[in-house]
Image: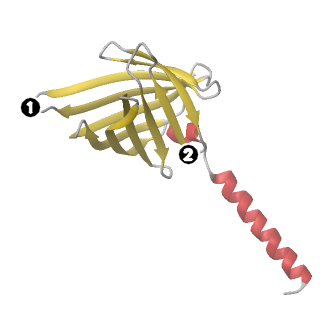
Amino acid sequence: MNIPGKMIAILLLLMGTTVHAQQEITFKEGIVGQWEGQGTLFGTDAAFKMHWTTTLNDKFVKLSFQNQFVDKSGTTRVMKASAFYNLEKKEGYWFDSRGLMLPLKLEPAAQSLTVWWGDESTEQGKTVYTLLGKKRLNVEDYVLKDNSYMSFGKAQYQKSSVEQGQN
């Protein structure tokens, strides 16, 4: 290949890389919308729903969450929660139907978010959200027990809709 041919090939390669980089969305952009999932919670099959929006002039990402499972006694358990995440400051708060309010520390990445929840005065754990393309999401939950993180929940979600934030 001659020099002009090599330069054209390099230019095309760079243009393709730039277009690909421009098409990738951030975690914040990708997470907004309605999600439904299936997985396990405490070793039992469970159903999950999440609704993510941007709110308060895009300063926060709000999560509205619900899980449902049947416990070993046959009782259907439902837990609801809301959380506010400030991705820029890497912190937030979780509020749930058990009456808990947990402080959050965030580790955002391009296609994932790790949330460290709780402190010395509350239960502690972490949740890892991983976007898999534009319409799939994996979520793994761990609780801190005896100085070790033990898995208690896993789910795979499908995005059912996308909507704009509520500023």
Give the side of residue 163 with respect to residue 58, left or right. left
Q: Residue furthest bottom?
A: 1
- Residue reaching furthest to the left: 73
Question: From the viewer's perspective, is residue 104 above or below residue 142?
Answer: above
Q: Residue at x 50, y 49 (%)?
A: 134
Farthest front residue? 146
**Which residue shows up at 57% across the image and 34% down it?**
107
Quadrant in the picture for residue 147 = top left
The residue beneath circle 1 is: 74
| Colouring scheme applied when the structure was drawn | secondary structure
Is residue 128 placed above or below 119 in the rendered structure? below
- Label 1 vs 2, first from the N-terminus: 1
Label 2: element kind: loop
Instruction: Say what amino acid the circle numbered 1 marks.
Output: Gly
User: Please, what is the three-letter code of the amino acid marked with disc 2?
Assistant: Gln
Q: How many marks?
A: 2
Please identify the quadrant where the C terminus is shown: top right
Question: How far across and how far down the image is residue 100, in percent?
Answer: 36, 14
Q: In the rendered image, which quarter contains the N terminus?
A: bottom right
The mark found on residue 111 in the picture is 2
* C-alpha gap between disc 1 and disc 2: 37 Å
- The percent position of residue 105, horizontal first and vertical second, equals 54, 25
Res. 95 in view: yes
**Element under disc 1:** loop
How many C-alpha atoms fall within 10 Å of the one at disc 1: few (<14), some, or many (≥20)? Answer: few
What residue lies at 57% left-to-right and 23% top-to-bottom? Answer: 91
Looking at the picture, how far across and down is residue 28, in whole percent? 57, 36
